[in-house]
Image (spheres, rainbow, N blue to C red):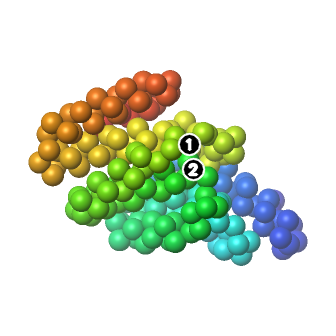
Amino acid sequence: LVAALPETEARREQELELLLGLGAALHGAKGYAAPEVAALYRRAHALCAALGDSPRLFTALSGLAGYACMRAQYGEAWARVEEMLALPQDRLEPLHLVQLHFTASRVRGFQGHLRAALAHAEHAIHLPDPSVPESAAFTGIAPQDAKVSALGFSAMVLWLLGYPERSLERLGRTLRRAEDTGYLYMQAASLLY
């Protein structure tokens, strides 16, 4: 239906909103590694570039990084993270900054760069607690707490770096924060670490 509309900036805006909303639904229905997810976020990325839209470009890049990471394409995932890191940080929502550094931590950790992974996780953990904007419901971020993920991932990295006591302390913080969110998904996810 959108393709039938004339190619205008208003049409691109509408398509972008539709794609980003659909991205969250596709994650849930098909998983982060589904080819449809990549196609959707590639199109959203192109639209953001055409519109010069940094905040929504972050969401498109985050979707592409998640896709690449879930397919063990860590070089590609890191390239998307580097694009996110290059975005004007003052134009991103605090929630995006926490998500950015958690994503950077996860990708660096999977690449075996454990100290860099820990540094990004620590950065995410120490950022001010973001409020969840209403728009997050359409970006797939709302039911998640990236600080829970950063805490849990950092616990795993601390263990791998040879700091079991710090790792266990961090796991305790992870579980407490997950409980505080009230989201069953985050409580279950925190148990993976």
Whether tag 2 and tag 1 are in contact, CB under 8 A, the answer is yes
Give the x, y percent position of residue 14: 79, 59
Image-quadrant location for residue 148: top left
Give the x, y percent position of residue 60: 58, 61
Tell me what residue is drawn at x 62 percent, y 48 percent.
139
Rate crowding at label 2 as few (under 14), some (14 to 19) or many (20 or more) other CA atoms within 10 Å: some
Q: Secondary structure at mark 1?
A: loop
Looking at the image, which residue sits at the far right?
Answer: 6
Tell me what residue is drawn at x 21 percent, y 39 percent.
167
Q: Dot 2 corresponds to which residue?
A: 94
Q: Quadrant of the C terminus?
A: top left
Tell me what residue is drawn at x 75 percent, y 61 percent.
15
Q: Earlier in the sequence, mark 2 or mark 1?
A: 2
For the residue pair 42 and 170, the one nearer the viewer reads as 170
Q: Amino acid at mark 2?
A: Pro
Looking at the image, which residue sits at the far left?
Answer: 162
Q: Is residue 161 left or right of residue 90?
A: left
Q: Amino acid at mark 1?
A: Pro
Q: Dot 1 corresponds to which residue?
A: 130
Give the x, y percent position of residue 175: 34, 28
